[in-house]
Amino acid sequence: MSEVYESERYVGEYLLFHYGKAKEILPWEMGPVGALDFPVRTVGYFSEGRVERSLDVGCAVGRSSLELSRESDEVVGVDFSRAFIDAAEEMRGGGQMMCRRLEEASDYSAVEVSRPEGVDGVGVSFEVGDAMNLREDLGSFDRVHAANLLCRLPEPRRFLERLPGLVKRGGELVLATPCTWLEEFTVKENWPQGRTRDWLEQELGGDFALIEAADEPFLIRETARKFQWTVSLVTRWRRV
Ligand SMILES: C[S@@+](CC[C@H](N)C(=O)[O-])C[C@H]1O[C@@H](n2cnc3c(N)ncnc32)[C@H](O)[C@@H]1O
């Protein structure tokens, strides 16, 4: 099912989700404006201060990776979708792209999106990779970020098992998940038994200490009049 993220429609939706201005995503004041800027807010969970290396798994079109680069000498963004990684690389290097925004039916408008201010893309690299089988020579990181990825993986435990080797001792992990477990992505045997938060504590507890858990809404514009409003469970962990 990960092929869905290769489509032009998803590239447009995610470019707008990550880089669109508030009015381009949500023209109404009555809308849930607190759900905008999700890829910036999840990165805000890391402790303050500069670090050497950060990893963003399931980075999509790259906004959180670019945000991580404000406080990190090197950032690696990894995603399974070639189309997303190409867009992320174009935003990093070129700094802007035209994004196709679906209005309704077959009617699209064009919106120019830009790299966020104060970020030049230096030190950031993007690559296609599988969270369940990340390359062995990635090394270890001070910060690992994975937003809305877990419940899109066929075997999420394989990713969780790799995390202790990816996060340096004392380093931080921020996981966000809307806990929307669906059979089209993950067979039922691989879903958590019970609540996702309890399952994460069980799976990560030996190697990570849970520092905080919070709820963060996000908004994805599907058409001019239809939006996904979802609340992600964000957890921050320290590698013990
Ligand atoms: C729901 S999106 C979230 C993207 C981004 N982190 C965000 O918060 O906007 C899920 C992302 O995970 C990626 N993905 C799905 N399966 C993956 C896998 N096995 N390895 C790496 N990335 C994967 C998708 O291509 C997509 O970019």
Image (cartoon, grey):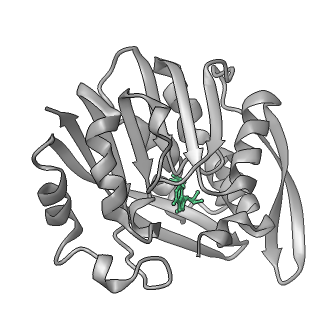
Quadrant for residue 105, please give it. Answer: bottom right
Residue drawn at the location 50% of the way across and 84% of the way down: 184
Residue 19 picture quarter: top right
Identify the residue at image location x=25%, y=52%: 214
Residue 108 visible at all: yes
Q: Quadrant of the image for the C terminus?
A: top left
Residue 59 picture location, percent across and down: 56, 47
What residue is at 45 percent from the left and 38 percent from the top?
Answer: 136
User: Ligand 1 quadrant?
Assistant: bottom right
In this image, 88 relative to 208: left or right? right
Residue 229 picture location, percent across and down = 48, 69
Q: Quadrant of residue 109?
A: bottom right
Question: Does any portion of residue 234 appear in the rendered image?
Answer: no
Task: Give me the residue at 35% from left, 15% from top.
Answer: 49
- Among all residues in the image, which is located at the extreme front? 136
Q: Residue 81: percent from the left, percent from the top? A: 66, 57
Tell me where residue 181 appears, x and y as whole percent: 37, 77
Quarter placement of the N terminus = bottom right
User: How many circles with numbers are drawn on the protein?
Assistant: 0
With respect to residue 8, does 24 lie above or below? above
